[in-house]
Image: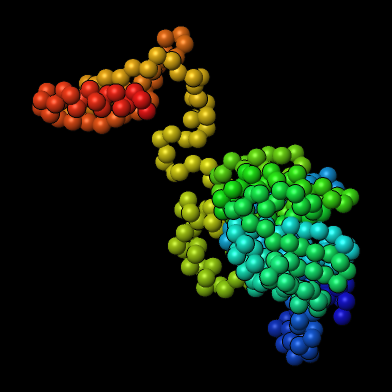
């Protein structure tokens, strides 16, 4: 059975009756089932397939948990490595352990995909290196150690869970500067969306193509799991991010949205001063210490609140009051 035969078979399955499907299942050999499972192109969601064209440099796949991001990444890397001799690939995880256990040894990782494709690859755990018979190699790196990506050159890169990297900015920059080998260097980022600055920057780059999807789009997930997740988290902020793959920038109900903070950023301050404000509520018997400063054109703002005491304590502890004022100004 070749790929075209398998495509026609899948189309026929959609029209077949229950009796016809029963006959088909009885006729399939274990080798046929294994082959069908290995043809990822037959089962993949549109968001799991590589973008068309040759003008993109970064493929950003932001999707919910269980969507199939790891399988898509491993399929993309393996298909190119197996068909292009001698290329060098960076596999970058949140840590070396994550890169090894998920991207290489995981149930949807490179070794599993190679087995489904009935191809032999060599995994050298002590060196963190995967080798293909045609001379292509993939090396694992950690997003927690940016300097490890300084120097090596690569044709391809697969970056998993970028939002978890501790040194995300520096690691990404070092990776991009080394992604210069071959005719068309490219990178795939598979991640659950989180509102970090780096993901927003990558998403806005003109050479980035974004795909994605929801957890429930994966027909291979257990139905009970999908139902429990949807009933428990569906419609919530966590569910929108982790299940539906939405980028949510602000906490629900936040008084100070991120875009408001950015619009209100001010120039450097001058003339620091401090002192006690009036009570915050009518009849309140507490008094607080504030520290602020003025800007050009006579405007000012409060920088911090240094504490609060009862009025009786302030009257009997002037020295303590002065010491706290001095400490606030120094800060």
Which residue is at the far bottom? 26
Q: Is residue 69 visible?
A: yes
Quadrant location of the N terminus? bottom right
Q: Position of residue 88 (x, y in %)?
A: 81, 58
Quadrant location of the C terminus? top left
Q: Position of residue 157 (x, y in %)?
A: 74, 55
Q: Nearer the viewer, residue 32 or 331?
A: 331
In the displayed structure image, the side of residue 278 where residue 138 appears, left or right: right
Q: Position of residue 323 (x, y in %)?
A: 24, 26
Determine the residue positioned at 45% across, 18% down. Answer: 269
Q: Position of residue 274 (x, y in %)?
A: 30, 19
Q: Nearer the viewer, residue 7 or 324?
A: 324
Quadrant of the image occupied by residue 232: bottom left
Determine the residue positioned at 44% across, 44% down. Answer: 252
Q: Nearer the viewer, residue 206 or 177?
A: 177
Q: Is residue 168 above or below residue 129?
A: above
Q: Is residue 37 above or below residue 67?
A: below
Quadrant of the image occupied by residue 22: bottom right
Determine the residue positioned at 10% across, 25% down. Answer: 316
Q: Nearer the viewer, residue 105 or 60?
A: 105
Q: Is residue 280 visible?
A: no
Determine the residue positioned at 66% across, 61% down. Answer: 69
């Amino acid at each position: 059975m070749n790929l075209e035969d398998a495509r026609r078979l899948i189309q026929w399955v959609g029209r077949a009756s229950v009796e016809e499907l029963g006959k088909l299942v009885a006729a399939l050999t274990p080798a046929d089932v294994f082959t069908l499972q290995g043809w990822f192109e037959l089962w993949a969601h549109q968001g799991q397939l590589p973008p068309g064209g040759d003008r993109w440099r970064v493929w950003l796949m932001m999707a919910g948990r269980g969507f199939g991001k790891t399988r898509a990444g491993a399929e993309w890397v393996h298909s190119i490595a197996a068909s292009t001799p001698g290329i060098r690939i960076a596999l970058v995880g949140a840590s070396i352990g994550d890169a090894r256990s998920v991207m290489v040894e995981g149930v949807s990782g490179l070794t599993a995909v190679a087995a489904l494709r009935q191809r032999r690859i060599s995994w050298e755990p002590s060196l963190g290196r995967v080798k293909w018979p045609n001379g292509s190699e993939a090396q694992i790196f950690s997003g927690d150690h940016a300097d490890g990506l300084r120097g090596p050159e690569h044709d391809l890169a697969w970056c998993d869970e970028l939002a978890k990297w501790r040194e995300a900015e520096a690691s990404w920059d070092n990776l991009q500067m080394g992604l210069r080998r071959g005719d068309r260097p490219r990178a795939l980022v598979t991640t659950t969306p989180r509102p970090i600055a780096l993901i927003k920057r990558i998403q806005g780059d003109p050479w980035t193509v974004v795909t994605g999807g929801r957890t429930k789009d994966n027909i291979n997930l257990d139905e009970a799991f999908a139902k429990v997740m949807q009933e428990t988290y569906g419609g919530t902020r966590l569910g929108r991010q982790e299940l539906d793959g939405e980028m949510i920038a602000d906490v629900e109900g936040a008084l100070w949205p991120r875009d408001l903070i950015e619009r209100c950023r001010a120039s450097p301050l001058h003339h620091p001063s401090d002192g006690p404000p009036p009570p915050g509520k009518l009849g309140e018997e507490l008094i607080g210490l504030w520290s602020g400063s003025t800007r050009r054109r006579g405007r000012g703002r409060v920088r911090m609140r240094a504490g609060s005491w009862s009025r009786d304590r302030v009257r009997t502890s002037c020295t303590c009051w002065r010491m706290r004022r001095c400490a606030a100004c120094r800060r």
